[in-house]
Image (spheres, rainbow, N blue to C red):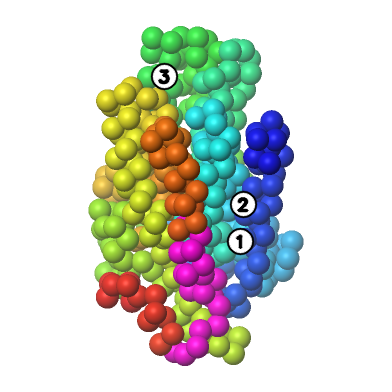
Amino acid sequence: MLDRLEQRPVLLALLIGIAALLLFGIGVQRPSILMFDEVHYVPAARALIDLSHPMNIEHPLLGKSLIAIGMLLFGDNPLGWRAMSVLAGALTITGVYAFTRHLTGATRAGLFAALLAMLGQLVFIQARIGMLDVFLGAFLVWAGIAFLRAMQIESHGRAALLLSVSAAWFGAAVAVKWAAVPYVALAGVAFLWLRRGHPQRFGGTGWLAGLAILGSVSIATYFLTFAPAFFYATDPLTLARLIPFQLDMWKLQTQVLSPHNYQSDWWSWPLMLRPIWYFYEPDQGATRGVLLIGNPAIMWGGLAAVAACWWAGLREKAGAPLAVAILWTFALGVWAAIPKSLGFYYYYYLPAIILSVALAVAFHHYAARVKRNDEWYLVLCVGLFAYFYPILAALALPSDRGFERWMWFPSWA
């Protein structure tokens, strides 16, 4: 069947998206009350719906605007709070398939990466909560797809259009969280490097024109997303205040915060030393929990895949493995440089998605050696996902201490 679907990649992408939509959407109303950082973003979305006053101003508006759209469509209830997150999660999975397929030229690798991203647990959880990271990830994944396609296109006009689309998605990602800014810079560096010695790439777009597209379109997209703030009833934004407002956001982003029970250092995230309980309390007549924790087979096995990709990239000059290895290392490394006083495991969201791609690329590159072992690996990932599912999807637990069966280490509690 896969052989036939390889001839219809758009249909396969659609099927992957539908599967992700169902997986993420079933039971999304659990829990029935706000959990974790929804207490910040849902009220901010309400303020946007009412155009009443600024809230949660340390982050740009787009992510909260998307949450507000879900609330306008489905109401101020758990489905409304999380509906757009579910959609963004499904688009992320579809994007992982498309990105990996374009990177490797192999449908099997793209499908494998998408399945691992679905089973990796972090996308699953972030797609079922009204937070910003799932939107950030969706925009960046699709920006990467457009960038990759622009590089591969020979037509100058189409390449420039795709580069513009990529820049728009990058700008939208920054308009969700400033954590996307380093990826815009990476795109600029990658553009210069990839056309170095290969000026025909990107349809022959010149270096100055390419950088101008990436910079101007992304910046314009970012500032356009502030439009709702100009219509607040109280303290509306003005053109004169637009730039100073960015400085206010910077101060809030870089302020020193009080210690938090779930804080962790960036180097600990790949080891999954400190997951986060997004929710653990009685709800709808039972004790329920939502633990932000990755699938151990993917989170830990993915590290071996990154090492294998580095090896293939540096020793064998393999382009796709090297690209993925650089991406993962960069995605984690930026958190060592970003001036944040506190770190949390959910910051690992983007590197975790890239791990799924790294695994797929590594299995594809070493296919002759591993043969069909990737299928057995996928079975292991499915088994672990099913094992953790009750504390991912807020199912009813047998007792107040029901969480203990999943606590492999003291630091997970």
Mark toward the start of the polypeptide (2 vs 3): 2
Q: Would residue 335 be found to the left or right of residue 98 on screen?
A: left
Gap between marks 2 and 3 measured at Cα: 30 Å
Q: Position of residue 173 (x, y in %)?
A: 51, 43
Marker disc for residue 90: 2
Q: Give the amino acid type for the residue marked by disc 3 in the picture.
A: Leu
**Label 3 sits on residue:** 194
Q: Residues within 10 Å of mark 1 (few under 14, many from 20)?
A: many
What kind of element bears circle 2? helix
Quarter in which the C terminus is drawn: bottom left
Q: Residue at x 41, y 73 (%)?
A: 277
Q: Residue at x 48, y 43 (%)?
A: 372
Q: Is residue 96 visible?
A: yes
Q: Would residue 403 be found to the left or right of residue 45 on screen?
A: left
Q: Give the amino acid type for the residue marked by disc 1 in the picture.
A: Phe
Mark toward the start of the polypeptide (1 vs 3): 1
- Name the front one of labels 1 and 3: 1
**Label 1 sits on residue:** 24
Of 277 and 227, nearer the camera is 277
Total tally of numbered discs in the picture: 3
Q: Residue at x 31, y 66 (%)?
A: 274
Q: Position of residue 328 (x, y in %)?
A: 36, 41
User: Image height check: is 317 above or below 181?
Assistant: above
Q: Quadrant of residue 150?
A: top right
Q: Is residue 232 magenta?
A: no
Is mark 2 in CB contact (under 8 Å) with mark 1?
Answer: yes
> Which residues are the magenta region?
381-400
Is mark 1 in CB contact (under 8 Å) with mark 3?
Answer: no
